[in-house]
Image (spheres, rainbow, N blue to C red):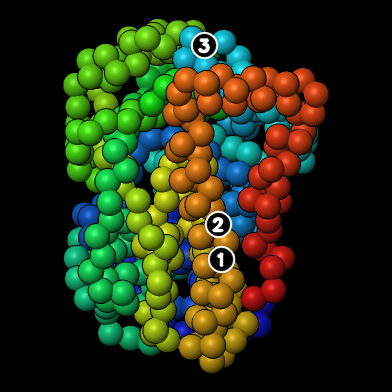
Amino acid sequence: MAGALRSRPVTVVGGGVAGLTAAIALRQRGADVTILERAPAITEVGAGLQLSPNATRVLDALGLMPALDAVSLPSQAVRLRDASGADVVRLDLARHRPRARFRLIHRARLIEILEHAARQAGVRIALGQAVDTPPDGTLAIGADGLHSRMRTALNGREVPFFTGQTAWRAVIADENAANAPEAQVFMGPGRHLVSYPLAGGLRNIVAVLETRDWQDEGWSRPDDPANLRAAFGRFGGPVPGWLAQVDQTHVWGLFRHEVAARWQDGRIVILGDAAHPTLPFMAQGACMAIEDAWTLAACLDHRPDQQAALLRYESLRKPRTTRIVAAANDNARNYHLTGPKRLAAHAALRIGGKVAPGAILSRFDWIYDFDPVTEAP
């Protein structure tokens, strides 16, 4: 640590994954950090998260892995299945990446860990603070999420477009879930369903349907579970049993946003969803936010010139996050193939899984092998 952050006042707008992680990283380097959170309490209903090694390396460097391990499960594999439930290919993470730490965790548990660590480190958290314009001060960090006011201050008003996809989230009880700690993806024409276990005998479900019916963006709209069951009524394997247990669900429309053209102006800087909202098809939204947080703190601590530090942060993060967002966009198409293209793609995956299963995983080495902690700030 170079020491340029020592005693420097920093205001973080937003108390989610991005804001809390940034606050911890900044405070551990000596900054005087205040979080302004709009909500009256730091809570997260949400659902599950998949944390891959590029993010857990940061959490480990922040000293948070023991707490995280206690309330999460290891992710041992990703199993791709067709809509009938038949296996297409199983990507064995435990075998091909034995030292990599993939974890499955409820978002609320991660928020609890981060909030506790932030308070223990001496971060001040001011609740019920609606921030519509950038706060005065030497540095304001916009971690205010999908509808970021800080992003608007830097880039003006932007209009995302509806992808024609609607998603449901649900969590159900599943006492046997931890016996097979792996993410399963069921791929059907025009729709797919992802499920994985969570600690405490729970199972996370995310189901995505191509539709012309527009839905609001965000996670807060409740929906009738019967709509979810009807949309995936032809799916087989364990899916019907899982969906039969859903007694409450939330639905939202998936919108595509561009990566922000401008991330900072020397005084305001954005990170996480405020900078690069992504579709949920690479399980990298929270992971990118955690990477951002470490890199931003490292750049600010390494360079006394704040503008130069923020320029360095933007130059490091924008190319990588842009590439990940594009990969998520591609997966949205790959999961929903129809007709001959679907048959050919699944056949290729089955053959690849038998001949060279490690080669399929290696396509994403650039995501999972990346280590923000050792990157030069």
| Real-space Cα separation, disc 1 to disc 2, in angstroms | 6 Å
Task: Confirm whether residue 226 shows in the render.
Answer: yes
**Vertical placement of 250 versus 344: above or below?**
below
The residue at the point 22 percent across, 76 percent down is 133
Please give the residue where the numbered disc 1 appears in the rendered image.
Answer: 319
Percent coordinates x, y for residue 290 in the rendering: 52, 57
Q: Which amino acid does label 2 sit on?
A: Arg
Please give the residue where the numbered disc 2 appears in the rendered image.
Answer: 323
Q: Residue 127 carries which label?
A: none
Percent coordinates x, y for residue 52 in the rendering: 60, 44
| Real-space Cα separation, disc 2 to disc 3, in angstroms | 31 Å
Q: Residues within 10 Å of mark 3 (few under 14, many from 20)?
A: some
Q: Could you tell me which quadrant the C terminus lies in?
A: bottom right
Q: Which amino acid does label 1 sit on?
A: Pro
Q: Which tag, 1 or 3, sits closer to the chain's start? A: 3
Element at label 3: loop
